[in-house]
Image: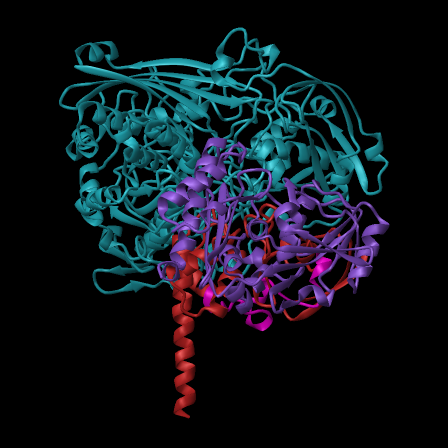
Amino acid sequence: MKPVRFDYKRPATIDEACGLLASDDNARILAGGQSLIPMLSMRLSRPSLLIDIAHIPELTALVETETHIEIGAMVRQAVAQKSELVKMHIPLLAKALGYVGHPPTRARGTVGGSVAHADPSAEIALVAATLGAEITYRVEGADEVFDASDFFIGPMLTIAPPTGCLTRLSFAKAPVVCGTGFHEVAPRKSDYALASAAAQINFTAGSGVTSIHLGVGSVGDFPERLDVDLLCGTPLDDAAITDAVHAAMQMVETVEDLHATAAYRKRVATELAIRALRDARDEISKDLNQ
Amino acid sequence: MNDVTLTINGKPVSGVTEPRVTLLDYLRDVAGLKGTHAGCEHGVCGACTVLIDGIAVRSCLMLAVQAEGVDITTIEGIGGSGAHAGELGVIQDAFCETHGLQCGYCTPGMILTAEALLSVNIDPTEHEVREAISGNICRCTGYVQIVEAILLAAKRLGQRNDAATSDTTVA
Amino acid sequence: MSEQKYKFLSTPRRPVEDRRFVAGRGKFIADLDRPNMLHVAPLASHYAAAVINGIDASAALAMPGVVDVITGAELAAAVEPLMNGLNTPNVRRFPLAVDRVRYAGEWVCAVVAESRALAEDALEKIIVDATPQPFILDAEAALLETSAPVHPEHGSNLLLDRKFVWGPVDDDFEAAAHSLSFSVTWGRNSTVPIETFGVLAEWNGWDQMLDIWASIQMPKYADQIARSLNLPSNAIRVHYDVDVGGSYGVKRGIKHSVLVGYIARKLGCPVRLIEDRLENMRAGDAHGPERKFDITIAFDQDGTVRSMKMRALDNAGAYAGRAPFQLGKPISAIVGPYQINSVAYHALSVTTNKTVQEAVRGFGQAPTNYAIETAMDRVAEYLGMDRLALRQKNLIREDQFPYLIPSGSYYDSGDYHAVIDKVLAAADYPAMLAERDRLRDAGMMAGIGIAACLEPSGGNSSFEPLLNESNQTSTWMESCQVNIDALGKVTARIHTTSSGQGHETLVSTVLGEVMQIDPELIRITRPNSLESLPGNSPVGSRMAIMLGGAAARAGEKLKAKIMAIAAHRLGVAIDQLRYEGGDVLAHDGRCLGWDEMVELAHRQYHNLPDGMDPGLASFDIMQVPTGDALPVNDKVQMYPCYSFEFHLLLVSFDPIIGRPDIHSYFIGHDCGTVINPAIVSGMTYGGIAHGIGAALFEEFAYDANGQLLTQSFLDYLMPSSHEVPAIQIVKHCTPSPHTVFGQKGSGESGYLGAPAAVSGAINDAVSGLGIHFEKLPIRMSAISDAIAAKTS
C-alpha cells in the first residue's frame, strides 16, 4: 500500500502555502497526516503535491482573546487536550478530545486538520458545529471566516474554498456558568463512532439559561446542530429534554452501513443527545435551582 | 527525490528518498532497522509504533520527509547495543518475565508504547495501561500478560527510582 | 503422574524465544533482503465473476523499474494446479486467475519490479478486458441446481455432500420425549495475524536449487511447491529459521509461493511478495469458515440429550482450499463433552464467488462447539431447566474414560465435572448470579455465558480419508534430532517454522526434563527442509504431543546409549546403574561423569561397547498415538488427546446502546500436564480474545455485488485491550495416557469455547424478552434493534 508519487514542499508562511495550493489544482495541504496518509496509502487520495504546513509558526498558536480562544490549525490534538485554556474556556471541546482517535494519533493529528477533513464522525467537527465556532481560511492573501454550523455539507465535504488553507478555529469562551455533555458510542472505544452528541448550556446569573447548543454526529453525512431553543426558560426537567430532543431528531436522516442500521443510529443519537443535555444541565443544577 | 537526514536512536541517518516513502519504510529500508513492523499500513494496528521526542507515534502515518528535526526512537534504541548487546532494558525484561508476547510481531510497538506511558506516568493503574495500549492490536496474547508486564515494569522502575533517591539522601 | 515431580516441566520458566522479540530482532520475511531482489504486486479483479478476454500490460512493462508482468495464462502453461484435498479434479486452482475471475479481489496478474511502490504504480497501467458474469454468494442458493457454477467444468457448486449416521438416530428420536430444532450461523471470520503472508524465493541455476523463506504454518509445504513447479522435491530448500508473525492456522501460502517460485526461476533473481493488508484481507489466506447449522435435538423430560441431527452447510468460496476438511475435523468431537448416544451429520461444502476459505485455528471445531452449546442452552430453555444443571447431567463422567463417541473416536481422559466445580468456586457463582440480577434491577440487560467444550489435540489426518476415500493416508508424524557435541553441549533440531507457540522452549524443556539438564543450556536450531526429517507443522494442536513426544523419545534414546556406555565402562549391568543429572551412578558409589562420558563417546572408540557407533546423536520420528487405521464404516479414531475447557462469564449492556461489557471471565482449562505454564496460559488468553472477536466484532462481510465490505482494519474490527477483559484461568490436570508426560494440546484453547460462551451470555441477557441471536458476530446494532422491536 504505497502512495502515488508526489512532490513535497515546506512553506514558511501561510501565503506561500496558499500560493502553492493555487499553483496546482491537485495539491493538498498536509497537516497532521493522520487522516490523509491512510488515504494516500490506499491510493484513495492521489495528489501531485503535498504542502506541509507544520513549520508555519503562526499556525501552532493557541491564544486567548477577550472573548475567544483561538486555536491555530496546526495545534496538535494532544496539545489542545492538555491546554488549560481549552479546559477552562472550551470545556465541551476538552471533553470531546479524549474520544478522538488514540493517544498516538492525537500526538500528530491537528485540530484544524480534523475540521478540514470533515469526517462525519469527527468529534472536533461536531463540537465546532454545535458551538458555531468560527473557521478562518486564508485565500489569496485575505481571510475568510465561516460559521462551523453551516460549514459541513456532506461526508468529507465542506464549503471551504478549494485554494484556501484553514488557519485557525475560534471558539467563544464559555460563560462562567456553563454545563457541557459529550457522549459517543462505537463498537470499540476510539472506532469511528456510530453516534455522538455534544451539548452545552450557557447560563448567566440574573438572565438564566441564555443559550443551549446541541449537535449530533456520525449518524448522517455531516455533524448537525439540533434546535432545542424552546428549552430555554424552562426548568430543563428530564421529560422536557426528552421531548425536545425527540422533536429535533425527527428531521435527522441517519445512514446505514455494515456496523449499524439507520434505526440504530437514530435511536442511539437520540438517547445520547438526551444524556448530553442532562449532563450539561446537571453540571449547572446548583445555579439553575436558585 | 529529497535528501533527508533523520535522528534515529541518537544518531543522524542520511538518505535520499521519495516524499511518498513513509517513516516506517524509511526506517526499515533506508536505515536498515527491521525492528519496526508493518501490520496494516493504514494506522490502525500500531505495530509500526516508534517514539518521536519520547511520544508514541504511528510511523506508517508519517512521511520520512516530515520526520526531520525530531528525535526518533525505535526498538533498536532500547536496551543494550554494541558491547552491551543482549542486555535488556527494564520493560523488555518485564515482557520476558510475564511472557507478554508470543509471535513477537506487535512487540516492538507495544514496548515503545509502554516506554512512552511509563515516562510520564510511573505508577499507572491497570485501566491506564489498557488505555495506553488500546491502539496496539495483538492477536496472540489477549493482552493479559502484556498488561502484567507493563505493571511489573512500572513497579521495578519505581523501586529503582526509590533506591536512587534513598542513595542520594544517604549521601 | 503428579506435576510436582517434574524438575523443569510445569515450572515457571521464561520462554527462550522472547529475548529476540523484545529486542526487535525477530527474523520475519519482510526483514530479509537479498541482493538484486525484485518485488511482486498482484493485480486484483473487481468483478465477483468475469470471463477474462485479454490483458494488456504493455504500458506497465514500459515503465522504469518494471521487469515483468505474469498472467494466469502464462502460469497455467508452466505449473501444475494447486492440490485439492477432495476428489474434485475439475475445480482447478492456480495462483492467478486463468480464463475466469471467480471472486472480487482475485489476483489476475502480477507485476515484478524493483520496488513495491514501482510495482503498484505499474498495476494501475494494466488494462484487463473482462466480461462480468452472473455470480452467487449465498451457500443455500449455491446448492440449487439452477445456480451458476463457479467452476462450470465441475458441473455444480457442490464440493462435498456427505451424510453420516452414527448410532441408532431414528430409534433415539422415537424414544425421546421431546425434540426441538433451530439454526445458527457462524459468520465468516478468521484469526487475522498482524503480519501478512510473505514469501521470498531464489533460484540458483548452477545448483538447480530453489531457496524459499516464507511465513508459513503449512504441512507438506515443500512437497506441494515441488509438485506445482514440477521440480524434484530435493530441489526445493525451505528455510525454517524464520519467524512467523502469528498464524493461528491461516498461513498456508501455497498460491503465493508457487507464484513467487515460478517468477524466481523465470527471472533468475530473488523475488519477494509481501501481501499488503488489502491483498491479505481480500485475496490472501485470510478467510475462515462461514457455516450455517441446522440442528434437531432429541431429549427427555429430565434433560437427558439422546440424539442430535446436524446439517452443516459451509461456504467454501471460489476454490476448494481446506474448507471441506474443516467440516470433517469436528467429527472428532461431534458430541462435544456430552453422552449423546447417536448423531446424524450432514456435511455440505459449496463454492461461491467469495474469497477462498482457508484453515483457521481449530479447523472447524469452534463453529461446531458454538452450535452444540447453543443446542444445550435451547434444551434448557425448553424444559425450564438451569443451563448449568443440564450440562452437568449430560457431561461424560470421569469414570467413563476412555469414552467412545458415536463417530468412532475415544476421548482419552478427563474430569469435566471437577473442572466445572473448580470454576464455580473460583468465580463465586452465586455472587455472579446475584450481580447479574443486581444489574438487571438497575435497568441493564445482563447475562451469564456458559460453555463446555473439548479441544481435540494431536493432529491426525483421518478426516481426509473419511471424506475422500481415494486419499489413503494415515501417517501423521513429527520428528526431532538431538546431538551432544564433542564438548558436551546439547543441540536439538526442530523441523518446522513457529508462529509464537514457543516450540524452542517446548523442546528444550522436554529434553532438559528427560536428560536432567538445565533447558537453558540446550540450543535449538531449525534446519532447512532438506536437512529435516518428516514433520507436519504446528497444526491441529499437536506440537506438545508430537514434537514433545519426538524430543522425549530422542532424549530417551540418548540416555539409553549413555547408560550402555557407562555399563561397559564401569563393568556393571545396566540395571545396577542410575542416571542422575547427566551423570551415571553405580550402586557402589562409582560414577561416570558427563564430561568423561562425552570423551568416551567422541574420542575413545576403543572403550565403547562392541558394535556401538561413536558420537552421541539420536533422532526420532514419531507417529501420532492411536493413528494406525483408516476409517471403517464411516468411523475412525481422530485426534488422540482431548483437552477440556469450561467458560463462565458475566456480560451486561445498556438496552439502547447495546454494547456488551464483559464484567468477569473465568475459564477452567485442563490440557493434561502443562509443559510451560506461561506459554499455555498466554495461548488461552489469546484464544479467548479471538473468540470475543468472532462473537461480537469480526466478519468478512460482502455486499450484494460480491464486494468485500471489510477490506481493511477500519471495518474488520479486532478486540483491543479495552474489549478483552481480565481473565482468570482455573487449572486442572487429567493426564493423557497416550503421551510421555500426560500432556495434551492447548494451541486452540479459549478460541474453541469463547464464541459459544459470549453468545450464550448475550442470549441469556435477552432471554426474558424472548429474543434469540442466531448469527455471529452479534453486533451492538442488532442487539439494540432486537430489543427495540420487542419493547416498542
Relative image position of residue B139 (x, y in whole percent): 47, 45
User: Is residue C638 among what the camera can see?
Assistant: no
Quadrant of the drawing holding the C terminus of chain C: top left
Chain B appears in which tint?
red
Residue located 16% across and 14% down the image: C177
Seen in the picture, residue B72 relative to C657 is either above or below; the reply is below
User: Does the magenta portion include B77?
Assistant: yes
Report the front residue among C656 and B16.
Answer: C656
Q: Is residue B15 left or right of residue A173?
A: right
Relative image position of residue C323 (x, y in whole percent): 48, 25
Q: Is residue C681 left or right of residue C193?
A: left
Report the front residue among C62 and C675.
Answer: C62
Residue located 63% across and 50% down the image: A148
Relative image position of residue B71 (x, y in whole percent): 64, 68
Total number of numbered discs in the rendering: 0
Seen in the picture, residue C593 relative to C466 is either above or below; the reply is below
Residue located 41% across and 54% down the image: A281
Looking at the rendering, the stretch of residues picked out in magenta corresponds to: B62-91
Chain C appears in which tint?
cyan
In which image quadrant can residue C627 be found? Answer: top left
User: Is residue A163 among what the camera can see?
Assistant: yes
Residue located 56% across and 37% down the image: A220
Relative image position of residue C342 (x, y in whole percent): 25, 17
Q: Is residue C256 left or right of residue C369?
A: right
User: Does the magenta portion include C466?
Assistant: no
Report the front residue among C15 and B120.
Answer: B120
Q: Is residue C723 left or right of residue C307?
A: right
Work out which residue is located at the far front of the displayed protein and give it. Answer: A206
Chain A appears in which tint?
purple
Judging from the image, the colouring scheme is by chain
Work out which residue is located at the far top of the displayed protein and give it. Answer: C146
